[in-house]
Image (cartoon, grey):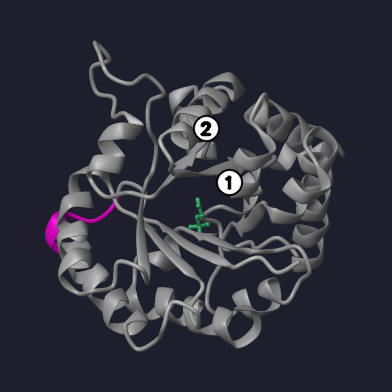
Amino acid sequence: MSRKPIIAGNWKMNLLQSEAKELFSGIKDFVKQYSAEQLPIVVVAPTFTSIAAVESQRCDCGCRNLLFTAGQNCYFEKNGAYTGEISVEMLKDAGCEYIIIGHSERRQYFSETDEMINKKAKAILSNGLIPIICCGETLEQREAGVTDTHIAGQIKAALESLTEEEISKSAIAYEPIWAIGTGKTCDSDEANRVIAMIRNVVKEISSTSAGDAVRILYGGSVNPSTIEEQMSKSDIDGALVGGASLKVDSFTSIIANTMKVAV
Ligand code: PGA
């Protein structure tokens, strides 16, 4: 079954509005050379304060169907007394179509739990947006041989009581924590093996068709020279890119190299 690849740039806590605009403008100039059919789904996740700046350029350039924006996090409640939080509806109102949830940095520094991630996934899907649900093991877990059980647990908890249709629309990002921002990419056969394992978990808890439909990305030190091999693997449906998404050249090379093998 063919799944349209997703290349998503996670800008994390980087770039002021003027810098975000400049980066977006470079990405936009690149994608505008192609049609939506030729491109992977290209997503960028700016900081909350730069979403409007990026969105205004996206509306002006006629590239709404070539480039998409994502929130880097959200809160699951609709509104109310939750100082500092942003709801799914607010991100939708700002123009976002995707929201990253459960990133290891949020789990580690902001105590995001599997239960919260599940609530966020439900809120995102009920608003018609697409969650990019992150999972991944630490180096200690990998060395202890518990990678698969740990990740299967994260996935089961994140997808708990979602419908088959909701799961089919969702995206998952497998990001081994030891590979994030370290320059140590996970071997692509191993990344593909873990991703195929995740797909089997989805089949087991939902259905074969949901497992076949869900897009599962790899993340962790992806760069222009690793992406081609990663995208040539059977189960890797794209990439969640951190560091290399902050420069026009590297991010657009990742998109171009993906198009060589997998759109
Ligand atoms: P990296 O980050 O590409 O800088 O390793 C990936 C991520 O955290 O999503």
Name the side, left or right, on which 187 lies relative to 25. Answer: right
- Image location (x, y in percent) of residue 242: 45, 58
Name the side, left or right, on which 78 lies relative to 178. Answer: left
Badge 1 is on which residue? 170
Q: Which quadrant is home to the C terminus?
A: bottom right
Q: Marks 1 and 2: CB-CB under 8 Å?
A: yes
Q: Any mark on residue 104, and which?
A: none
Q: Residue at x 51, y 40 (%)?
A: 103
Q: How many callouts does the rendering have?
A: 2
| Relative vertical location of residue 253 with respect to residue 68 in this rendering, above or below | below
Q: Nearer the viewer, residue 6 or 47?
A: 6
Q: Which quadrant is home to the N terminus?
A: bottom right
Q: Residue at x 43, y 25 (%)?
A: 110
Query: Could you classify mark 1 by the number of other residues whose Cα lies within 10 Å: few (under 14), some (14-19), or many (20 or more)?
Result: many
Q: Amino acid at mark 2?
A: Ala
Q: Quadrant of residue 235?
A: bottom right
Q: Any mark on residue 121, and which?
A: 2
- Image location (x, y in percent) of residue 94: 22, 45
Query: Could you classify mark 2 by the number of other residues whose Cα lies within 10 Å: few (under 14), some (14-19), or many (20 or more)?
Result: many
Task: Find the distance from the CA under tag 1 to the CA under tag 2.
Answer: 9 Å
Residue 212 visible in the current orientation: yes
Q: Main secondary structure of the magenta part?
A: loop
| Range drawn in magenta | 14-18
Residue 143 visible in the current orientation: no
